[in-house]
Image (cartoon, grey):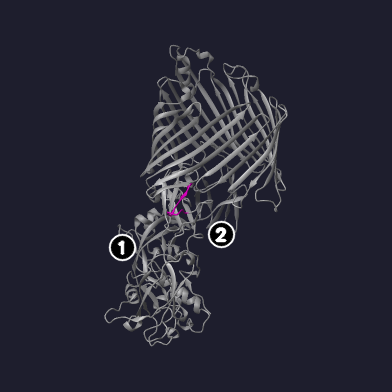
C-alpha cells in the first residue's frame, strides 16, 4: 500500500474543474495510474529505491506495466510530485497566507526534481510587500547578491530573503511564499493589496433604476403617478462619469425629468486621493455641507491598508527575552506576535470601532507574565500617528434651497495624527461674503476620546453691515466593556449670537436680498446630540437613547427630539419598545399644534415552528401618540421558496381614532436580473395599488447584461459556454452568452469571486473556478473564467500486432500536440476533445515501435444523450517510418 500525492496534496477532483495549466495531463496520468492500481500487485513503490533526499519521490517498476510488450513504459517523469514543465504561468501570488497579486511567472529548466524553478525580480518582490532593504542588509549588498540589478533570479527564495521559502501549486494555479515577518514591509495589513495590482476595470456603461407605478382611488376620484430614479455611469479607463436624475409621469402633467448631479471622477493613487470635476457636495466633517459645481480633491482612506485606515493606538512596551505579546479587547484576542528582547512597538492593530481599552499581556520565554493597559476610545477626528486626511473644494453653490445667490465657495480641511493620543485638525470655508476658520484637536485618554474645536466666522450682509461670532464644539466617545455602555456620540456646540455656519451664511444672503430682516433669521445658540447604547447583560437585551436638543437666539423655547428604546429576544421571539418625545420652538416657520408630540410603540415577532414554511413570521405592532391616537397592526410575513427569493406580507390595521380597519398585502420577487415588487391596500373609502421594479444594467463590449442594483464597484464575469453556472452572489447565474454581473465588490480590497460549475453542460469544463481581484472605486472589472468545450468519448483499441495498449501510455492530438489523456485498464482511453475528428498518437516510449496512431471520427452530436460517453472501437495503426515523434522525448529534453 502506498499513497501518491499531486503537488504535495492528496489526490482530489472537482466536477467540471481542470487541475491547473501547463502539464496537467502528466499529473492526471500519474493520479489515474495510482488510483486504478494503488491496491494492485501489478504496480508497487519500491521502498529500497525510496530516496529520502527527494522528498515524496516514488519509483515505479516499469516491468510490472509490461502488459505483453517487449518495451517498458518510461515513467521517470512521474517519480517526482509537482513536476512543472518550463514556461510561463499566470499564477496567484500569496505571501504568508494573504493574496497579493495575479502575475505571470516564468519557470526555467533546472536540475531540480520538479524540472524547473520560478523566477523573481526586485520589482515583483516589492509589489508583494517584501522589505528588500532589510533583506539586503541581512545578506550584504555586494555585487554577487542575487537580486542586485533588475534581472530575474531563478532559484530558492531563501538565497536572497533569509528564512523565506516558496511552495508551488500548479493545480490551484498559485505560489505560496512564506516570508519571516521581519522582512515584510511595516504597517502592511493582512488585507493590503499593492496599488500596482489594483484593477481599473473595463470601458462600460452602467445604469441603476428604481421605478414605481402608483394608483389610488378615494371617494370617487382616482390618481395615477409614475416615478423612476436613474443613476447612469460611463467608465473609460480610470475615468468615471456619473449622472443622476428622476423621471415622473402623471396623466394630468405628462412626463418630466429632473436632473440631479453630473460629474467626472478619477483616482490619484500616489496621493491616496480622488479628483472630482462637476457637481457634488462639500465635505461635512468640519463644516456644513452644501451642493456645488466645480472641483474637489479629497483623500480616500479606502486606499490605505487597514492598519492605517482607522484609528487604533500604538502599543509600546519592553520584553526581557524572546517574548509573546498578546493584545485583548473586551476579552477577545485581537492580535498576537513574537518580539525580540528590548523595546517593541505594535502599530498595525485593527481594533474594533469606538474602542474599548486594550489589555496587553507579555509572556516571557521563562513563562513570566506581565500585563498593562492601553487606553482606547475614538472619535471621527482621531487618526493614527503620521497619517493625514484632507479635502479641498472650489466651485459655485448649486444647493436648490439657497435661492439665487449664486455664490462661489472654497473649502479646505486637514487632519493629521500627531502622536499616539493626539490628532490635530484645521479648516477654512470662504464665499464672497463669508469667511470662517476652524482649529481643533482630538485626544485619546483613559476615560474616553475627546474632540474640541473652535470656529471663528464673519458674514457680510447686503446693506446691513456684518455678523461676527464664534462656535465651540466638544464631543466625547467611550466604550465601557465591563458595564456594556457605549457612548458612540455625545456632542455639545455653543455659538455666539453673531455666528453663522457655511450653509446659513449662504442662505441669509438670499434671505436679506428678498427684503427680510436678518433678525428674523433663525440662529442656533446651542445644540446637544446624544447616542448611548447599554447592553443589559447576557439575555438582558439592549437599551438605547438617541436624540438632540436645539436652542435659538431669536426663538423661544427649545426644540427636542429624543428616543428611548429597548429590544430583546426570548426563545426566538423578538420584541421591542420605543418612546419618542418631539417638541418644536414656538415660532418656527411652518410649526403648528402638531409639532409637540409624544409617541409610544411596541412590536412583537414570533417565528413559526420548524415545521412551518421557511421564514414565516407572525408580527404584531401597536403605537399611540397624542395627535393621532392608537393604531394596531397584525399579520404574517415569510418566504415562498427555500432561497427566500419570493417573499410576502399580509396584515390588517385598525385606527382607533378614525374607527377604520384596513387590509394590506405585498409581494416581492427577487431575480438575478431584477427585483419586482407589488402592494395593495384597501380601507373603507380608499384603495391603493403599486408595482415596482429595480435593478441594474451593464453595457459592455459583449452586449447588455442585466443584474440586481449595482453598488459603486462591480464585476463582469465572462465564462464562455458556461450557461447556468452559479456565481458567488445570491441567485446569479451565467447567461447564454457567458456573462454574469457581480453587483458589489469592495474597492482597493481583495475580492474572491467563485463559480460553481453545477448546472453547466456536461461537455463544458471550467478551467478556472475562482478569481481574485482588487478593483478601483467605481470600476467594472472583467473576471475571465476560461472554459473548454470538449466531447467526452472512449476508445477501445489495440496495437498493430493485436496486443493491448500499455497502461498509462499517453494519447496526444497530432494536429495540436495537446495531451488528451492516457490509456487505462483494458486498453481503453477516456478522452475529451474539442474536435469531432482527428488523429491521436499513442506513445509509451521514445522509439517508433513504441507509438501508434488512432484515426477517430465522432458521430453527430445528439442533445438527448449529451451526458453519455461515445464508445468507439478503433485500431491503432503503425506510425509510418520517419514520422515518429514523442512528447515523452521532448519533455525529457526540456527537463
Identify the image quadrant of residue 894. bottom left
Residue in the image at 50% along x and 13% along y: 516
Looking at the image, residue 857 lies above or below residue 477: below
Which numbered circle lies on residue 144? 1
Which numbered circle lies on residue 229? none
- Left/right placement of residue 689 relative to residue 383 reads right
Residue 379: image x %, image y %?
54, 37
Q: Secondary structure at mark 1?
A: loop
What residue did someone put label 2 on? Answer: 365
Identify the image quadrant of residue 627. top right
* Residue 321 seen in this snapshot: no
Does 164 lie within the magenta span? Answer: no
The CA distance from mark 2 to mark 1 is 38 Å
Looking at the image, residue 264 lies above or below residue 27: above
Say how many tags the image has: 2
* Residue 299 seen in this snapshot: yes
Q: Residue furthest front?
A: 220
Mark 2 closeness class: few <14, some 14–19, many ≥20 residues within 10 Å: few
Region in magenta:
734-745
Callout in the foreground (2, 1): 1
Residue 815: image x %, image y %?
32, 70
- Left/right placement of residue 177 relative to residue 567 reads left
Residue in the image at 56% along x and 21% along y: 525
Earlier in the chain: of badge 2 and badge 1, it is 1
Residue 743: image x %, image y %?
48, 47
Between 256 and 97, the one lying in front of the other is 256
**Magenta-drawn stretch, dominant element (helix, strand or loop):** loop
Amino acid at each position: 500500500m502506498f499513497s501518491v500525492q499531486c503537488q504535495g496534496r492528496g489526490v482530489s477532483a472537482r466536477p467540471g474543474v481542470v487541475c491547473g495549466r501547463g502539464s496537467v495531463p502528466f499529473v492526471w496520468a500519474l493520479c489515474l495510474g495510482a488510483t486504478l492500481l494503488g491496491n494492485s500487485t501489478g504496480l508497487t513503490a519500491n521502498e529500497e529505491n525510496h530516496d529520502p533526499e527527494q522528498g515524496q519521490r516514488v519509483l515505479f517498476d516499469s516491468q510490472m506495466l509490461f502488459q505483453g510488450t517487449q518495451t517498458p513504459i518510461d515513467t521517470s517523469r512521474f517519480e517526482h510530485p509537482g513536476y512543472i514543465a518550463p514556461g510561463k504561468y499566470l499564477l496567484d501570488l500569496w505571501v504568508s497566507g494573504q493574496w497579493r497579486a495575479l502575475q505571470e511567472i516564468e519557470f526555467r529548466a533546472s536540475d531540480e526534481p520538479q524540472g524547473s524553478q520560478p523566477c523573481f525580480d526586485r520589482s515583483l518582490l516589492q509589489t508583494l510587500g517584501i522589505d528588500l532593504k532589510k533583506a539586503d542588509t541581512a545578506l550584504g549588498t555586494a555585487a554577487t547578491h542575487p537580486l542586485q540589478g533588475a534581472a530575474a533570479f531563478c532559484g530558492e527564495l531563501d538565497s536572497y530573503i533569509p528564512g523565506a521559502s516558496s511552495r508551488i501549486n500548479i493545480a490551484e494555479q498559485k505560489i505560496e511564499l512564506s516570508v519571516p515577518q521581519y522582512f515584510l514591509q511595516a504597517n502592511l495589513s493582512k488585507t493590503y493589496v499593492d496599488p500596482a495590482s489594483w484593477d481599473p476595470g473595463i470601458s462600460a456603461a452602467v445604469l441603476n433604476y428604481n421605478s414605481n407605478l402608483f394608483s389610488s382611488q378615494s371617494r370617487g376620484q382616482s390618481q395615477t403617478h409614475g416615478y423612476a430614479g436613474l443613476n447612469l455611469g460611463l467608465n473609460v479607463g480610470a475615468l468615471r462619469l456619473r449622472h443622476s436624475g428622476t423621471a415622473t409621469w402623471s396623466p394630468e402633467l405628462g412626463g418630466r425629468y429632473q436632473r440631479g448631479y453630473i460629474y467626472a471622477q478619477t483616482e490619484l493613487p500616489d496621493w491616496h486621493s480622488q479628483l472630482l470635476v462637476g457637481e457634488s457636495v462639500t465635505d461635512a466633517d468640519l463644516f456644513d455641507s452644501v451642493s456645488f459645481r466645480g472641483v474637489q480633491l479629497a483623500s480616500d482612506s479606502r486606499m490605505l491598508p487597514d492598519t492605517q485606515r482607522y484609528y487604533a493606538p500604538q502599543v509600546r512596551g519592553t520584553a526581557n527575552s524572546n517574548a509573546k505579546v498578546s493584545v485583548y479587547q473586551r476579552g477577545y484576542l485581537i492580535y498576537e506576535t513574537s518580539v525580540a528582547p528590548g523595546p517593541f512597538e505594535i502599530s498595525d492593530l485593527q481594533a474594533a470601532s469606538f474602542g474599548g481599552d486594550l489589555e496587553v499581556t507579555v509572556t516571557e520565554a521563562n513563562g513570566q507574565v506581565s500585563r498593562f493597559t492601553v487606553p482606547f476610545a475614538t472619535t471621527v477626528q482621531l487618526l493614527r500617528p503620521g497619517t493625514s486626511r484632507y479635502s479641498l473644494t472650489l466651485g459655485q453653490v448649486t444647493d436648490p434651497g439657497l435661492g439665487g445667490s449664486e455664490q462661489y465657495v472654497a473649502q479646505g480641511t486637514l487632519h493629521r495624527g500627531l502622536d499616539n493620543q493626539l490628532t490635530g485638525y484645521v479648516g477654512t470655508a470662504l464665499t464672497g461674503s463669508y469667511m470662517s476658520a476652524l482649529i481643533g484637536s482630538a485626544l485619546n485618554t483613559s476615560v474616553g476620546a475627546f474632540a474640541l474645536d473652535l470656529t471663528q466666522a464673519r458674514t457680510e450682509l447686503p446693506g446691513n453691515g456684518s455678523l461676527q461670532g464664534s462656535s465651540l464644539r466638544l464631543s466625547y466617545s467611550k466604550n465601557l466593556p465591563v458595564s456594556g455602555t457605549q457612548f458612540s456620540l455625545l456632542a455639545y456646540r455653543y455659538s455666539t449670537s453673531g455666528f453663522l455656519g457655511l450653509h446659513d451664511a449662504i442662505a441669509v444672503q438670499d434671505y436679506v436680498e428678498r427684503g427680510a430682516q436678518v433678525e428674523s433669521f433663525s440662529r442656533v445658540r446651542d445644540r446637544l446630540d446624544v447616542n448611548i447604547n447599554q447592553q443589559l447583560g447576557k439575555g438582558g437585551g439592549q437599551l438605547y437613547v438617541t436624540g438632540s436638543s436645539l436652542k435659538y437666539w431669536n426663538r423661544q423655547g427649545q426644540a427636542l427630539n429624543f428616543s428611548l428604546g429597548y429590544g430583546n429576544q426570548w426563545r426566538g421571539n423578538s420584541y421591542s419598545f420605543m418612546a419618542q418625545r418631539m417638541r418644536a420652538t414656538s415660532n418656527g416657520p411652518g410649526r403648528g399644534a402638531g409639532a409637540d408630540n409624544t409617541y409610544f410603540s411596541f412590536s412583537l415577532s414570533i417565528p413559526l415552528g420548524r415545521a412551518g414554511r421557511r421564514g414565516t413570521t407572525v408580527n404584531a405592532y401597536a403605537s399611540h401618540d397624542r395627535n393621532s391616537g392608537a393604531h394596531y397592526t397584525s399579520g404574517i410575513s415569510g418566504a415562498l421558496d427555500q432561497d427566500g427569493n419570493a417573499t410576502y406580507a399580509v396584515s390588517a390595521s385598525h385606527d382607533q381614532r378614525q374607527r377604520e380597519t384596513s387590509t394590506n398585502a405585498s409581494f416581492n420577487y427577487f431575480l438575478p436580473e431584477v427585483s419586482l415588487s407589488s402592494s395593495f391596500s384597501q380601507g373603507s373609502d380608499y384603495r391603493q395599488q403599486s408595482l415596482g421594479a429595480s435593478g441594474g444594467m451593464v453595457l459592455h463590449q459583449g452586449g447588455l447584461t442585466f443584474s440586481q442594483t449595482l453598488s459603486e464597484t462591480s464585476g463582469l464575469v465572462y465564462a464562455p459556454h458556461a450557461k447556468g453556472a452559479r456565481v458567488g452572489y445570491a441567485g446569479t447565474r451565467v447567461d447564454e452568452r457567458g456573462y454574469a454581473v457581480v453587483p458589489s465588490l469592495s474597492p482597493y480590497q481583495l475580492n474572491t469571486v467563485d463559480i460553481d460549475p453545477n448546472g453547466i453542460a456536461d461537455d463544458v469544463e471550467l478551467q478556472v473556478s475562482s478569481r481574485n481581484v482588487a478593483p478601483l472605486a467605481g470600476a467594472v472589472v472583467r473576471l475571465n473564467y476560461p472554459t473548454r468545450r470538449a466531447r467526452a468519448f472512449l476508445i477501445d483499441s489495440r496495437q498493430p500486432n493485436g496486443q493491448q495498449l500499455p497502461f498509462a501510455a499517453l494519447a496526444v492530438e497530432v494536429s495540436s500536440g495537446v495531451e488528451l489523456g492516457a490509456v487505462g485498464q483494458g486498453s481503453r482511453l477516456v478522452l475529451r476533445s474539442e474536435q469531432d475528428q482527428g488523429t491521436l498518437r499513442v506513445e509509451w516510449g521514445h522509439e517508433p515501435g513504441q507509438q501508434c496512431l488512432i484515426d477517430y471520427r465522432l458521430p453527430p452530436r445528439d442533445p438527448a444523450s449529451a451526458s453519455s460517453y461515445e464508445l468507439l472501437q478503433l485500431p491503432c495503426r503503425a506510425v509510418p517510418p520517419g514520422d515518429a515523434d514523442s512528447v515523452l522525448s521532448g519533455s525529457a529534453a526540456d527537463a
